[in-house]
Amino acid sequence: MASRPPPRFVVRKQDDMGNRQRRLWFGLAWLGSLLLTGLVVGLLARHTAPAAVDQRQLRTLRAQIDDLQQQLVNLQRSDQVNDVATRSLRGTLAQREEEINGLRADLGFYSRLVGGDAQREGLKLQEVKLQPIAGSRGWNLTLSLTQSTRRDDAMTGNALVSVEGLRANKVVQLDWSALGDAAQKDGLPFHFMYFQQLHGTIVLPADFRPTRLRISIQPAGDEPVTRTVAWGDALSGNITTTAHGDPDAQP
């Protein structure tokens, strides 16, 4: 059976042509909206990207500042701890130095006490110390007496102290009765075998300028021992007792 040739004319409905045009315009509009949306998004991204970068940099800087502040606080605390430790160490060293000086003085005292030289025979005034009493004209007086370890009997007696100085531009001497306690009017009593420290208090007049001490030690049944000590030496602890006069020392 022979095939039929295609028709030369095709009849289409007018509504089909309108639908195709509408679909074409819808497609173009959709593509245009996509392009517009992309353009808007691009513009927004261009403006918001630097702001986001700035925010990140700001957070980074704040974190660095917080870290540096914490380091500064740690350093300040460490410095405070070191300062406290340094002051404590200095106080300890000063205390140890004072203890060492005291031990050296005690060592020298006991070394002289047990020494066997000829000058150590009999009774001797070993040390004289003066300490001012705050807020008064009073002074605490300490006398250290020793005797030779070769002696086997105790030493007893009294020690009297007088003070030489200037009063109204004149050299005067204040005896023990004008200086000491009425309860010790006969002097500072002693009784010892090898050594003893005597303690007393003297009070000076306000218009009196002391220059030196005269100490007279009277053992029972024996000759007295008299020594002179400069006032300044008794205050400083640099004691040199002599049987003769010392140069005047300033108070």
Image (cartoon, rainbow, N blue to C red):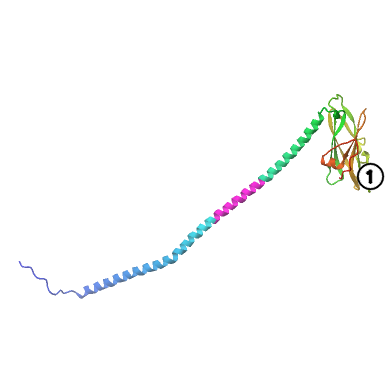
Report the number of discs. Answer: 1
Q: Position of residue 74 (x, y in %)?
A: 59, 50
Q: Secondary structure at mark 1?
A: strand
The extreme top residue here reads: 152
Question: Magenta segment: does it hold 230?
Answer: no
Give the residue displayed 55% in from the left and 55% down from the top. 66
* Quarter of the figure with the C terminus: top right
Please tell me whether residue 151 is drawn above or below residue 34 in the rendered image: above
Neighbourhood count class around disc 1 (C-alpha, 10 Å): few under 14, some 14–19, many 20 upward: few
**Which residues lie in the magenta part?**
65-84
Residue 178 position by quadrant: top right
Q: Position of residue 2 (x, y in %)?
A: 5, 68
Give the residue displayed 44% in from the left and 63% down from the top. 49
Residue 138 position by quadrant: top right
Question: Magenta segment: does it hold 73?
Answer: yes
Q: Toward the viewer: 130 or 41?
A: 130
Please tell me whether residue 82 is drawn above or below residue 111 in the rendered image: below
Q: Toward the viewer: 248 or 163?
A: 248
Pointer 1 residue:
171
Amino acid type, callout 1: Val
Residue 164 position by quadrant: top right
28 sits left or right of 118 in the view: left
* Quarter of the figure with the N terminus: bottom left
